[in-house]
Each structure stands twice: as C-alpha cells, then as structure tokens.
Image (cartoon, rainbow, N blue to C red):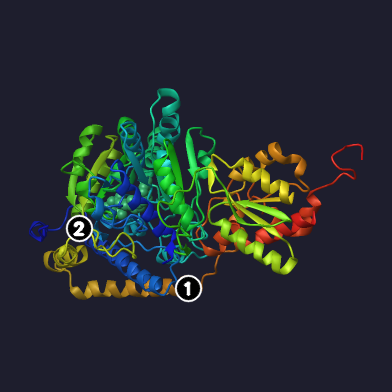
C-alpha cells in the first residue's frame, strides 16, 4: 500500500478543524497508543486477566471517526475491540480501561466483562458483546429512538471486515437503511479477521460496494489518515443528522499486531507488517502532517506526549491500587427486581440447607 | 506408549476419520491455515488440502446451514464453532432446519458441530458458555460432552459416523490439562452410553465434562476425610441419555447428587432428576440434589467466576449433606 502523504500534504488547514482540534486528534491517538503499550507491560506481568487486543496502526480511524460526532448533542457510538481510541474521544478514561483489563471491582463493569466491553450512554458509548455484528441492529434501535423522538442525535457503529459476514450485520444495516435511521456504519477493514484475510471474507472488491445492496451511499477512505477519516465520517454524520439516513463507510487500515497478544501472526506474508509500520503508521504520518503541513512545532507535540505519559502513569497507579471484586457481587444486577439472586444452598452452610427440608414424622404420608 | 492430551485426541479423531472417509470435511473460522483458535485442527489443511479443510467467512449460520446441505448430498461435514458460545448464531439452523430434516423431509443430516466450551478459564460471559441445555429439548439433535481424552477421541469418531447431527462439546479447560494413553486402533465410543468413572456404595454423583474431575476430587476427599464411598457416573452423552446406567447407580447407592457446570435453573440436572423420579423413585433414601452454577451470566474476574461456578468444595459439602440426610 502506497503512502498517501502526497495527498495530505497539499491540504492547507483541513476544513472545519481548528488548530486546537488538530492537536486534540493527535492527543487521542497518542493516548490510545501509550495506553495500549502500558497494557502490554501489565499483560506481561500477568496483571491483565484475559486477552489483550491491540489497535496498533489503527488509532487514526477510531479517533478520527469518533471525533466527527458531537458529544454536546448526545451522539452515541458503539465501538469494536480495536476502537479504544473512539471511546477515549467519547470520554472513557485511562483508569477505567486499565481497571477493566485488570478485572478490578471498581472497573466500569465491576469485573463482569473484559477489556473495553463497557459503555456509558451519558458520555455516548455502548459496550459491545463478543458476538460480532450484534451491535449493528442494536445501534439501529438506538438511532431509531432518536428519529422517533425527533432528537438531533446521531449514532455510529463499527464492524470489522470479518463481522460484515454475519447475519446480524446484514439484518441491522438493512433495517436501519429502510427506517432511515440516523446511523453511520463504519467497516474497519484492517486486512484480517483473526487469521482470515479479506479475500476469504468477501467476494466484493471493496466493502463499500455492499452499500449498493442496501440502497445507501457507500464511501471509502484512508483509515490511517486521521483527518481524512474525520472528514468522511463528518459528512456521513451530517447526512444522518439532516434526516438522510444511513451511510456505510469503509476505512482501510492494517492490523499490525496479532488478533490478540497470543497470536504470532504466522499466517501473514513476510514483510507485510514491517512495510505498514515503516510506510503507513498513522501517528508518524500525522506528526509529519502537523509539523510540515501545519507548521506546528515538534516541541508542542512532545509536550502532549509528556502529558499522555503522565496521565497513563497516574491511571496505572490508581488501577493497580483498585480492589478486587467482592465475590458475592456476582449475584447482583441480573434483574431490576429482584436486585439480587440467592446464593445456592450449599454455599449458605449445611445447617440451613438441612432446615429447608422439613420432614414429616412418618415417611411419605401427611397424617404424621 | 505415549500419553495423549484431550486436545490431541480430538485432532487424532479428525485425522483418522478424514483419512478413512473422503466425504468427511471440516468447516470453520481460522481452522485451516491457522489451525484453529486452540490449534485443534493444526496440520489438517496441510494434510487434506484447502477443499476439505475450509477457512470460512465469519458466519456461523452459513457454516451450519452449508454443512446441512452438504450432508444431504452424502458428505460428512464437521463444523467448528471458534468458541461454542457462537453456536447461538446458528441456533435457528440447528433447531429448526437440521434437527427436523430427517423427520419432516426424510433428509439425513450426518454432521457434527464441535467447539471449545466451558469456563474456569477467565473467559468472561461470551467465551465460557455451556449451552448444552439449550439444545437438550430439541428432538433430532444428539449431544455429547466428553470428560476424558479417550472419550473425546472415541465419541468424535462415533459422532462423525453417526447418521444424524451430533453436537460435540469440548471442554477447553481440559484441552491441555489432562492426558492418558489412548486405546490402540480404531477407537470408537458408542453415543448414548455412560461411563462409571468411580465405583462407590454410599452415594452417586452423576455428572459430565469438566465437573467429572471435580466430582472425582471430591470423592477422594470424602473417602479420606469422611469414610464415604462415592460413585461417580460420567454421562458422556446427554442426548440420548443412558437411563440404564442412571437407574443402576441410583439402585446401588440410593442417594444422588447431580453436578454440572451450567447454571442450575433449566440445566441438564433437571432432566436427569426427572428421569430418576420416573425410573427409580422407590430406591431413593434422600432428595435428589443439584450442584451447578449460580443463575447469573458468567462474569470475568477470577473472584466472581470462582464464586459463580461449582467448585470441589461445593460438591463435598453437598455430598456430606446428602450422606447425613
Ligand atoms: C459471531 C462471532 N463469531 C466468531 C467470533 C470469534 N472472533 C472474535 S474476533 C474474530 C475476528 C474478527 O475480525 P474482524 O471483524 O475483521 O475484526 P478485527 O479483529 O479485525 O478488528 C473472530 C472470528 C466472534 N467474536 N463472534
Ligand atoms: Mg478485521
């Protein structure tokens, strides 16, 4: 894949973005990367309980797209496993992420769910489940509610190239298209679904072509160009807000790490990962763009890097000091009512269990 | 002879059946080039080629549906769910289409759906499930859930040769943790037959899958500490269920504890308990008791998962209560 810096360098100030916003995009990308690097350290120290999923090399598409939403209007997104950056943009904090991965009792899900599977509808993100594709119909419903209530709100849902093969994806995007829901669907094409290359996932030349079948516009953009990602998403968000319905956006990027930390990527052709790292790293590209194209001093970016380091360090200290969950908390919150389900009889102690079996004095009769 | 893990035993069965019958093929996500998320199918594509070991799109419903169609035409597909939790995406195909095909349309579905199941691995709510009970009340499906390497191999071979659809649950906690010397030759374990995992006189634990090992651990402890003689029956097959073996152990010990990892409400234990009521009520000296998971989604944090799932100590406690009753 050729570097597209030629395309980005003839741009002057990108439309609709202030200098501060350009720096904010940089900040969120750097925060994503640094936070994940910290997670790798914690994973190696076995402090991360489950698997670790990286978005190395994909930070721009998550950050740029989420940045096109308006938090002040109550827009909501639903991220995928590699969209940590989008959650940070919506206000998720590093300490929350770290506590989640470390299964702490004061994590957003109180230790119930893994990694970035959590949400906050107030800040504007809804946690995914593992079953891929499921969030598309859910976000169709979220945005249907915006439409029905006449609210000026927009939804954004991410799916991977792999997840587009699920029935849920198809049903959800079709439903949203028919209902003209204010929804943006981003297909994050990072080349692989676990070990499966996109050539084995779809016979389409491009994921954007799928839009044709749903009667909605389909566009494609360079997901490693944060500003391009922002712009293409912004257009789709504006369309949605104007009542013009769903847009499918394919963002092309590349998964430089394995599916999760354990995956050695033996199935990747030699040189492919290095080439992307060398020629198409979204942070490197954006750094060049800001310093060369926008005339921002490197020292200013380094200052941001320092701020991010400090934030991640503080968050790590806080998360490490967090308590483990209280075992009995597992019984709370399955239903609104009852708020807690009972522990099983053998956990209550043998005596009380014996007492629950009231025995008549003569066996099997009632005339005792 | 070398010992073989539960995981390798499954792979051996796949190799041997593909070798034996050119109509056997494997379908699944990342099973070919990568060899599967747990490496169960490692080496299979290198040996049998891309057309018999197919890396599919991420589409459980299509995997199962396509397997059914190929099975109608006389092939013997083996589908892998990357985690058995994703079998829910193929629930419609399995329960509506596959399970009824023979009965309503005289179309055979000789196929297997297999995948890593179960908890105790910090997998969280969607990588730990035991959905066997969700299929137990679907006539037309068969369900097996082996606890040993030998049974894993023998039951998978039987499942592939069966004329109907068999759901083959593999416990991922057992994949690499247990191993044994496998019987030589073409080792086939008949579907529908339980296995007496331990003989005893005072009470019976009826169980399957990973909790067989917890039951055995509990039985040893009870023998050591309480002089209790505990029998452990490993069901191996849940559908069909071995009524004879169940009745036999109840008649022998007169006290029954049913243990499974799945949640208690609506779990397989309810069905087993009802069968005992039908088959051997008069032989009981105590109420039938169940040990299983609490009725909550399975949480991720170790402290929570350990609390929710049945542990050896729970089995010991419940068995003592039953013995004293
Ligand atoms: C319905 C379903 N089937 C299988 C899986 C197992 N699985 C988890 S991630 C993954 C690959 C996902 O690829 P893609 O959608 O491209 O997302 P990426 O990991 O590349 O971000 C698979 C097969 C799942 N989570 N859900
Ligand atoms: Mg992908």
Which SS class for mark 1?
helix
- x, y (%) of residue A69? 31, 49
Is residue A348 something that shows in the picture?
no
Residue A298 is situated, as x and y percent measured from the top left of the image, at 19, 74
For label 2, the crowd category at 10 Å Cα-Cα, with few meaning under 14, some 14 to 19 and many 20 or more, is many
Disc 2 C-beta below 8 A from ligand 2: no
Say if A18 sits above or below B296 in the image.
Answer: below
Disc assigned to residue A199: none
Read off the residue under disc 1. A320
Residue annotated with mark 2:
A224
Q: Nearer the viewer, residue B232 or A326?
A: B232
Q: Observer-nearest residue: A33 or B78?
A: B78
**Which SS class for mark 2?**
loop
B107 sits to left or right of A109? left
Name the chain under label 1: A
Tell me what residue is drawn at x 70 percent, y 65 percent: B223
Whether label 1 touches label 2, CB < 8 Å: no
Q: Quadrant of the N terminus of chain B?
A: bottom left
Image position, residue A290 (x, y; %): 17, 65
- Percent x, y of residue B222: 70, 64
Give the CA separation, mark 1 to mark 2.
33 Å
- Asked whether, in this view, residue A334 is left or right of residue A159, the answer is right
Q: Quadrant of residue A56?
A: bottom left
**Tag 2, which chain?**
A
| Residue at image location 32% in from the left, 40% down from the top | A183
The residue positioned 18% from the left and 49% from the top of the image is A221
Crowding around mark 1 (Cα neighbors within 10 Å: few <14, some 14 to 19, many 20+) is some
Q: Residue furthest right?
A: A368
């Amino acid at each position: 894949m050729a570097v597209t810096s030629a395309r980005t360098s003839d741009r002057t100030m990108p439309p609709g973005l202030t200098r501060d916003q350009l720096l904010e995009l940089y900040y969120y990308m750097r925060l994503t990367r640094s936070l994940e690097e910290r997670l790798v350290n914690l994973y190696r120290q076995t402090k991360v309980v489950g698997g670790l999923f990286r978005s190395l090399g994909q930070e721009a598409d998550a950050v740029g797209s989420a940045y096109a939403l308006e938090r002040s209007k109550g827009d909501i997104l639903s991220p995928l496993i590699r969209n940590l950056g989008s959650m940070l943009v919506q206000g998720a904090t590093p300490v929350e992420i770290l506590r989640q991965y470390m299964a702490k009792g004061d994590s957003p899900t109180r230790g119930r769910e893994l990694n970035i599977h959590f949400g906050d509808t107030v800040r504007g993100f809804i946690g995914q489940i593992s079953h891929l594709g499921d969030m598309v119909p859910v976000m169709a419903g979220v945005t249907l509610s915006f439409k029905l209530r006449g609210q000026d709100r927009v939804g954004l849902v991410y799916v991977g190239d792999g997840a587009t093969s699920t029935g849920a994806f198809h049903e959800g995007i079709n439903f949203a298209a028919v209902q003209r829901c204010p929804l943006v669907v981003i297909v994050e094409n990072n080349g692989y679904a676990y070990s499966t290359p996109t050539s084995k996932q779809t016979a389409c030349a491009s994921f954007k072509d799928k839009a044709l079948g749903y009667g909605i516009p389909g566009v494609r953009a360079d997901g490693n160009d944060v500003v391009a990602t922002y712009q293409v998403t912004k257009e789709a968000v504006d369309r949605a807000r104007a009542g013009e319905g769903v847009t499918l956006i394919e963002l092309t990027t590349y998964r430089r790490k394995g599916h999760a930390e354990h995956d050695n990527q033996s199935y990747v052709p030699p040189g492919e990962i290095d080439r992307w790292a060398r020629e198409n790293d979204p942070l490197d590209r954006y750094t060049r763009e800001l310093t060369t194209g926008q005339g921002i001093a490197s020292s200013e970016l380094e200052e941001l890097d320092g701020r991010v380091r400090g934030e991640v360090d503080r968050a790590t200290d806080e998360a490490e000091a967090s308590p483990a969950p209280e075992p009995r908390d597992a019984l709370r919150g399955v239903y609104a009512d009852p708020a807690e389900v009972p522990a099983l009889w053998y956990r209550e102690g043998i005596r009380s269990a014996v007492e629950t079996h009231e025995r008549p004095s003569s066996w099997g009769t009632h005339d005792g | 002879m070398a010992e073989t893990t539960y995981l390798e035993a499954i792979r051996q069965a796949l190799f041997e059946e593909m070798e034996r019958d050119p109509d056997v093929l494997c379908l699944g996500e990342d099973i070919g080039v990568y060899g599967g998320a747990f490496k169960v199918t490692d080496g299979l594509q290198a040996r049998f080629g891309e057309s018999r070991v197919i890396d599919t799109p991420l589409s459980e419903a299509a995997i199962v549906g396509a397997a059914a169609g190929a099975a109608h035409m006389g092939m013997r597909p083996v589908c892998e769910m990357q985690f058995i939790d994703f079998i829910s995406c193929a629930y419609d195909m399995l329960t509506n289409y596959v399970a009824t095909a023979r009965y309503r349309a005289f179309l055979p579905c000789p196929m297997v759906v297999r995948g890593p199941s179960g908890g105790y691995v910090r997998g969280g709510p969607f990588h730990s499930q035991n959905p066997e009970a969700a299929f137990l009340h679907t006539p037309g499906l068969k369900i097996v859930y082996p606890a040993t390497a030998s049974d894993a191999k023998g039951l998978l071979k039987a499942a592939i040769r069966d004329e109907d659809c068999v759901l083959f649950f593999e416990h991922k906690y057992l994949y690499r943790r247990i191993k044994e010397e496998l019987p030589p030759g073409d080792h086939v374990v008949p579907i529908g037959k339980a296995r007496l995992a331990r003989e005893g006189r005072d009470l019976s634990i009826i169980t399957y899958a990973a909790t067989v090992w917890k039951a055995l651990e509990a039985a040893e402890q009870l023998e050591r500490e309480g002089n209790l003689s505990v029998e452990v029956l490993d069901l191996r097959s849940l559908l069909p269920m071995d009524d004879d073996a169940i009745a036999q152990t109840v008649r022998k010990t007169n006290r029954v504890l049913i243990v499974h990892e799945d949640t208690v409400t609506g779990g397989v234990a309810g069905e087993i308990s009802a069968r005992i009521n039908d088959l051997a009520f008069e032989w009981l000296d105590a109420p039938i008791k169940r040990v299983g998971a609490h009725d909550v989604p399975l949480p991720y944090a170790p402290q929570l998962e350990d609390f929710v799932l049945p542990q050896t100590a729970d089995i010991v406690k419940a068995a003592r209560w039953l013995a004293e009753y």
